[in-house]
Amino acid sequence: MATQDTDPTAEFRKNQSWLYDSKPGAYVRKTAIGLLTLVVGAFILFPLYWMVVTAFKTTAEIQQIPPTVFPENFSLEGFRLVIESSIQAGGYAGLVQNLFGVTVSSAIDINLLGLVVSSLKVAVGAGLIAVVLGTGASYVLSRRDFRGKNLLMSLLLASLMFPGTAIMVPEWELISTLGLFNTHLALILIYGAMTAPFVVWLMKGFFDDFPDSIIEASRIDQCSAFETFWYVLVPMARNSLIASFIFAFLLAWNELVFALTLLDNSKFTVPPGLLTFVQGFNTQWNVVAAASIIVSIPVLAGLAYIQRYFVQGLTGGAIKG
Amino acid sequence: MSYVDHAQSSYENVSKHVPESLRVYLPILPVMTLVGVFILYPIAQAIYSSFFAKSLLQPDQAEFVGLANYVEIWTDPDIHQVLWNTAIWVSVGSLAAIVLGFLMGWLLDEKLPYTSVASAIVLIPWVLPRVVGASIWQFMFGGSQGIINELLVQLGFVDEYIVMLGSTELSLWPPIIGMIWRLAPLFALLTLTSLQGIDEHLYEAARMDGATPWEQFRYITIPMMKYNLAIGFLLMLIYNVRNFSMVWVMTKGGPGVSSSTLPVMIYRAAFIDFEVGFASALSVMLFVVLLVFSYYYIQFYDKVQGEM
């Protein structure tokens, strides 16, 4: 034992381990912590669990009272209906019939594929706009001093505070005036404008911390300000840029209010599309759950990537609801 | 490469015609234009519209009515209920999310196995599309198949299934619970980060001086975290005041206005009753509330930045 105690690696491991605790009353403490974790964890995870098991239940089982905690007949009916109705509503039924000889006919009407494509278009567009425009501005705001800088920063921060719900009426009028009503471009511009200030904030933080020596070195090598920015800073900022893009993407992917008011059914993105389906009569919850899982996948992939930027981003003036 | 060269040369072409002193504004111009047109202008427009009687169906026939819309707010039969609901949302929702989130952050900071995985999983409610999160809760609370009812029966709180989303007395609470579920993880993450930011040596020194765990918590943990917690606190308030999706998906603000909050009332006024002026006056009210919160948010944000 004595050898282990002096081995710094083993010592470190022990200190890192939750199970290693020599303090008196450790067992009581650990039991309490364990129980608390279970209760809190159940509250957070149970709805997610419920969504997943619901997706794998049959319609009959969902209507059963009392509800089953685990699916009795594990079924892919929900997923099948989502895919079938997407194929049908998207107008691919004939194609599938020709290619695979399978007749697709669906009793429900949810074109998830179409919604996902619309959302992808909007989210990627908004993310690109926000990152491209935001990064250039953040560089100047970080590296230069000029008149009105504080005012600009305050305006950008203030624009992050205002909720979609409070400006949706003027936004609706503006979009109508511009002739962009019921176009995805309208959403791309609005979401871009909603996230660009946040990108400025995040990227300004990056450029603020950037060592001057690298910039000076590139200046000595006769690079212009733009060349320094494009060939030196942008490649080094890759991670922050990707994180900014994903933030903008997530906002656009999840946003309901503007999509609901500025589009009609034919152009809907995922949130309003899902909403109309949830609120239809005879909602088939296994289909809703299956569709929810499908549309959450891009979000979870994004989360996995940007997890470590999350807090930085959130305390960094990102006040997105 | 050619694209880059092109971008560069066009940048230089443009900047040639701009006086040296103004060139620094060039990279900012696009962002400010976008934000100006799609965020700042609508804010100004909302304030302007609030002085007019205007219908969304005939936007050209606006009549200047001064403060009449603001007077109408205070005489509206629904406003007391809506303000009261909003107050409950903000106070109860934020407080519960903070307490639960703090607890979660604290538990995540215990050196439990797989903390990093756990903190990613815990964030899922926050990043999930809001409509998805809200529909899960709607399903759990709703109708004849709701699992919550079954749980309450099993635990002996009620004798038979009760209608929750369609009841004027209860309908406010299911969306609040959904919102707590959505926001607590965010506060947990803030707590976790600030806990991990505290230097272990401070605790060691305190232990040597014989400080009890409570004293360590009171005199080290809390002071070290206070600005981050203040930011988290204000974020919770801001999010709860602004929340629309959770209510709209679960209850549409009803039955009646029993679960409506300010944003839901704005939406209804504008897109169901088409009263733009009235809706704008309500929006201005919401702006004022948010401005107050935002003012403190920025203050605390500056302090955190200053200390980091």
Image: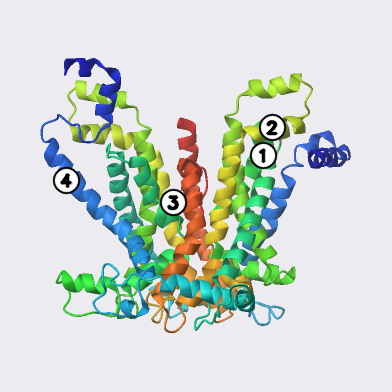
Q: Tags 2 and 4 in contact by the CB under 8 Å rule?
A: no
Chain identity of mark 3: B
User: Label 2's element?
Assistant: loop
Of callouts 4 and 1, the N-terminal one: 4
Question: What residue is disc 2 on?
Answer: A144
Residue at 18%, 74% in the rendered image: B153
User: Label 4's element?
Assistant: helix
Task: State which mark lies toward you, 1 or 2.
Answer: 2
Q: Tags 1 and 2 in contact by the CB under 8 Å rule?
A: yes
Q: How far apart are marks 2 and 4 (CA)?
A: 54 Å
Q: How far apart are marks 3 and 1 (CA)?
A: 25 Å
Q: Are marks 2 and 4 on the same chain?
A: yes
Q: Which amino acid does label 3 sit on?
A: Leu
Q: Distance between the residues labelled 1 and 2?
A: 9 Å
Q: Distance between the residues labelled 3 and 2?
A: 30 Å
Q: Which mark is residue B90?
A: none
Question: What residue is disc 3 on?
Answer: B235
Question: What residue is disc 1 on?
Answer: A149
Q: Farthest residue toward the front?
A: A101
Q: What residue type is labelled 2?
A: Arg
Neighbour tally class for label 2: few under 14, some 14-19, many 20 plus, Cα within 10 Å:
few
- Which quadrant of the figure has residue A194? bottom right
Q: Residue A32 carries which label?
A: 4
Q: Distance between the residues labelled 3 and 4?
A: 30 Å
Q: What residue type is labelled 1?
A: Lys
Q: Tags 3 and 1 in contact by the CB under 8 Å rule?
A: no
Q: How are the colours assigned in the image?
A: rainbow
Of callouts 1 and 2, the N-terminal one: 2
- Rendered position, B13 above or below A114: above
Q: Which amino acid does label 4 sit on?
A: Ala
